[in-house]
Amino acid sequence: DQQVKQNSPSLSVQEGRISILNCDYTNSMFDYFLWYKKYPAEGPTFLISISSIKDKNEDGRFTVFLNKSAKHLSLHIVPSQPGDSAVYFCAASASSSNTGKLIFGQGTTLQVKP
Amino acid sequence: DVKVTQSSRYLVKRTGEKVFLECVQDMDHENMFWYRQDPGLGLRLIYFSYDVKMKEKGDIPEGYSVSREKKERFSLILESASTNQTSMYLCASSILGLAGAGLGTQYFGPGTRLLVL
């Protein structure tokens, strides 16, 4: 049972345009969400996070939006750059579990074309 | 900066061999995790540990075991490697604390790409 889903395996955008990566979750106990970026042959690197008490968090070109009622979050990258081409994973966690476990989505491969 | 290192970047083993993957973190994190990454399946948790000598099964523990004798080191053991264990293995660490308080960020090592022939 996939509790965190990224339904788009891949996304292609033009340099300078907006990239929107989506993520859905099913567990209403999730209260902390993260996005990771992964280049081939490297480990994932933390990008941005959001707590369920917020609906938006911004860091430079990256903004994460959280819609709790829809159990949906999205990552916006504006403007997109060729160096943003990577696999993006969303992840979720529940404070109630108190284990620090993250549940990851399947990943979306973003390609930014020059 | 948090640093998580893994003993090998690439490894080739034969079916039936015992395989050890080592992970070391230098930030005094309590939590450590082992994942495998396969195309289309994302990151799947194999085992994790929140303290020395403590371990918990993740979602896919079958065929694996772990060891945590020191806080900074977490080892993944494939008791008898099989071809379906060919994968990218990722180690991560994090502070022990409530994720909702912003303490849930995990920091990953570079990964070990294991090929079992």
Image: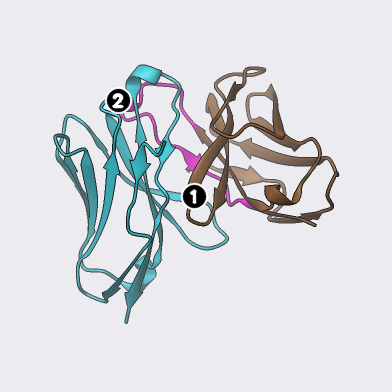
Q: Colour of chain A?
A: cyan
| Chain colored brown | B
Give percent across and percent down for residue A60.
22, 56
Give percent across and percent down for residue B51.
58, 19
Q: Secondary structure at mark 2?
A: helix
Q: Main secondary structure of the magenta part?
A: loop
Q: Can residue B87 be seen by looking at this rendering?
A: yes
Q: Image quadrant of residue B52?
A: top right
Q: Amino acid at mark 2?
A: Ala
Q: Which mark is residue B41?
A: 1
Give percent across and percent down for residue A109.
40, 63
Q: Image quadrant of residue B47?
A: top right
Q: Residue at x 70, y 34 (%)?
A: B64
The region drawn magenta spans B94-112
Q: Image quadrant of residue A104?
A: top left
* Scheme of image coloration: by chain
Chain designation of label 2 = B
Q: Which residue is mark 2?
A: B101
Tell whether position B104 is magenta. Answer: yes
- Crowding at label 2, few (<14), some or many (≥20) Cα neighbours within 10 Å? few
Q: Residue at x 69, y 29 (%)?
A: B66
